[in-house]
Amino acid sequence: MGKLSKKSTVSNNEGMLSPYRVLDLTDQRGYLSGKLFGDLGADVIKMETPEGDPGRSLGPFYHDIPDPEKSLYWMGFNTNKRGITLNIKRKKGQEIFKQLCRTADFIIESFNPGYMDKLGLGYSTLSEINPGIIMASITGFGQDGPYKDYKAPDIVLWALSGLGFVTGDPDRPPISPGYPISYFFSAIQAVIGSLIALYSRGITGRGQYIDAVTLLGLAWATGPEVQGLWPTNKQIVKRTGRIWPRPQVRASGEVSYIDVPLIYPCKDGSVKFFPFVEPGMLPSTNGLTQWVVEDGMASETLQYVDWSTWNWQTVTQDAVDEIVESFSRFFMNHTKSELWNGAQERGIQLYPVFTPTDMLEFPQLTVRQYWEEVEHPELGDNIVYPGAFTKLSDGSCKIRRRAPLIGEHNEEIYFGELGLSKEELVLLKQDRII
């Protein structure tokens, strides 16, 4: 079996990581890691089972046609990757994987803890083959500890992280996000840890193993609002939903709350506004108040309110409700666009709540050329994608290729780079190794 040369026929990426190769063994929990590496120019080789990655069955699908080659989910998270099929459960597949590891720089995987070790492909084994290899494992709870073997779907991690407790409305049970995002945190951690290990390798000459734990990433994301208030004053932050409860502390030390909306419905969606009265914020609140008055929708309380003397500690809920009612009627009389344009003219801190369509049409993203049109010859169409996660001065962080088809680069890598013969490829395919 010939020796792979990563310099021979790489992915033609040009970027900060273009000298480096990544072997991507992740499922949907870790696709993002490989994509970020690829966006930065690394040669990312996405490995699938011979029948195709299970993520290809995830919708939505191009033109609503369920097909493993038309999953928009797959396409979105696997751009800038080359794709091969390889069954690493079989001994021959493991031998091929080890050969690929010899000239790889990174391995990212998202199997259950211990799975790679059981296959004889754990870090301890692979680092003997390639001492410089950097391996990152993405899991829910990590490689050790009492929870390491527990199932860890998105909803479980969201709940155990504490984020579920503070998400939703106060009068209803906690909720999860509409889109599973828990593993995004550990996928990003895997990339960050791997790049730090790459820097260390430049000094020591040796790679490292990165244990990217989703629960830890989520626990960090709750931030001081959730974590910090308990040790300081034994306060548990609760769900507020669209309402921001402003605390009122009485002389007795008892705390009550005034409820003020953060989001209001308007004619064609929703907008976000809060009547801040702190220094520097008064022009915004006064600006909206004047606009409501001009439109003839202000109650008597709102017409004569003096926001400069407003005190959240003494105001009554009835007064707040009357003002909120005026704001609500005003917003429902305007579209998001009208409110957004008027707010900019009047110096009001008001923001439309965007839909996906709004995002596609948002001039800030359009002018910065964030959206990228990617050609899909197999579909006879071009598809618009979110672009680079960061803008580099040389423009090298970008989408260079669409996501691979099943086994699209088998010949390119196995025959052209690894040195296998076409007869060997036929036999491997017949034996379901590739």
Image (tube, rainbow, N blue to C red):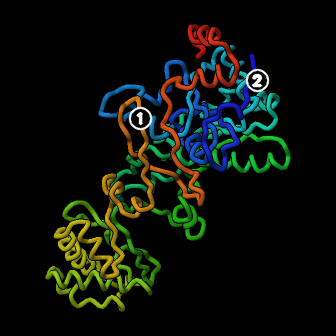
- Frontmost residue, 91 versus 142: 91
Tell me which amino acid carries mark 2: Lys
Residue that badge 2 annotates: 3
Q: Position of residue 210 (x, y in %)?
A: 70, 42
Spot occupied by residue 74 in the image (x, y as percentages of width and height): 45, 35
Q: How many marks?
A: 2
- In the drawing, does residue 183 fall left or right of residue 102? left
Q: Position of residue 35 (x, y in %)?
A: 55, 42
Q: In the rendered image, which residue does mark 1 sit on?
A: 376
**At x 44% / y 84%, what residue is drawn?**
251
Q: Secondary structure at mark 1?
A: strand
- Residue shown at 34%/34% (left/top)? 62
List x then y, in percent, for residue 311: 37, 86
Kind of residue sitting beneath label 1: His
Q: Is residue 45 above or below residue 353?
A: above
* Residue 94 versus residue 400 in the image, above or below: above
Q: Is residue 109 visible?
A: no
